[in-house]
């Protein structure tokens, strides 16, 4: 069995185990546009208002490690599947009614990129509940 098949077999075995909760994979990569093409890593919020966003770069040994993608970004891309069957049944359906120039409409929470921090929800019929939940979260209680 070649090295690639062996790795795939091991990975499939790990994915099938119920006691494995996380996997870390290190992989050398190159930009899809080809060698030498710039790569733009994930940008995180600025420390202060008005400053540019920042990258997550950490010195390691004689080089640096840079976060190219985040768990949050990955979740944002894969969560679209939770809007369709059969995965929709796995998530609690939450939607709000919002006013638009065209009239009222209902928006599903999964359709908003930043969930409760999205203005669509912050100024919706759930505004009070969202404010209470975010205050509780800041105080250390994520249950609401």
Image: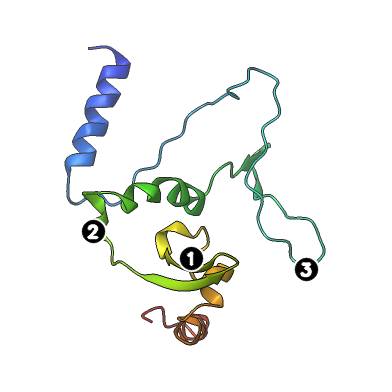
In the foreground, 108 or 68: 108
Specify which label sits upstream in the sequence, 2 or 3. Answer: 3
In which quadrant will I find the C terminus?
Answer: bottom left
Marks 1 and 2, the one that precedes in the sequence? 2
Q: Which residue has dot 1 on it?
A: 115
The image quarter in which residue 32 lies: top right
Mark 1 or mark 3, earlier in chain: 3
Residue at screen point 66% across, 50% down: 43
Mark 1, Cα crowd under 10 Å, few <14 / some 14-19 / many 20+, is some
Q: Are there few (<14), some (14-19), or many (20+) residues within 10 Å of tag 3?
A: few
Q: Which image quarter is the N terminus in?
A: top left
Q: Residues within 10 Å of mark 2 (few under 14, many from 20)?
A: few
Q: How is the image coloured?
A: rainbow
132 relative to 61, above or below:
below
User: Does 58 sit left or right of 130 as displayed?
Assistant: right
Q: Which residue is mark 2?
A: 90
Q: Of residues 5 and 92, which is closer to you in this image? A: 92
In the figure, 132 relative to 25: above or below? Answer: below
Q: Which residue is mark 3?
A: 48
- Real-space CA distance between mark 2 and mark 3, rounded to the nearest whole angstrom: 38 Å
Q: Quadrant of residue 142?
A: bottom left
Quadrant of the rendered structure where residue 89 is?
bottom left
Place of residue 2 in the rendered image (x, y in percent of width and height, measured from the top left): 28, 12
Instruction: Find numbered disc 1 in the image and state the secondary structure of the residue it sits on.
Output: helix
Q: Nearer the viewer, mark 1 or mark 3?
A: 1
């Amino acid at each position: 069995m070649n090295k690639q098949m062996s790795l795939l077999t091991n990975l499939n075995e790990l994915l099938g185990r119920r006691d494995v909760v996380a996997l870390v994979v290190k992989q050398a990569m190159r930009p899809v546009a080809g060698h030498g093409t710039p790569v733009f890593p994930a940008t995180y919020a600025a420390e202060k208002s008005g400053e540019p966003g920042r990258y997550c770069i950490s010195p390691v040994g004689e080089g640096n490690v840079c976060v190219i993608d985040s768990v949050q970004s990955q979740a944002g891309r894969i969560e679209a599947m939770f809007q369709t069957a059969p995965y929709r049944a796995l998530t609690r359906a939450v939607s709000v009614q919002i006013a638009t120039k065209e009239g009222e409409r209902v928006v599903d929470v999964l359709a908003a990129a930043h969930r409760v921090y999205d203005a669509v929800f912050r100024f919706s019929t759930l505004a009070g509940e969202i404010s209470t939940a975010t205050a509780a979260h800041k105080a250390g209680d994520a249950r609401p």
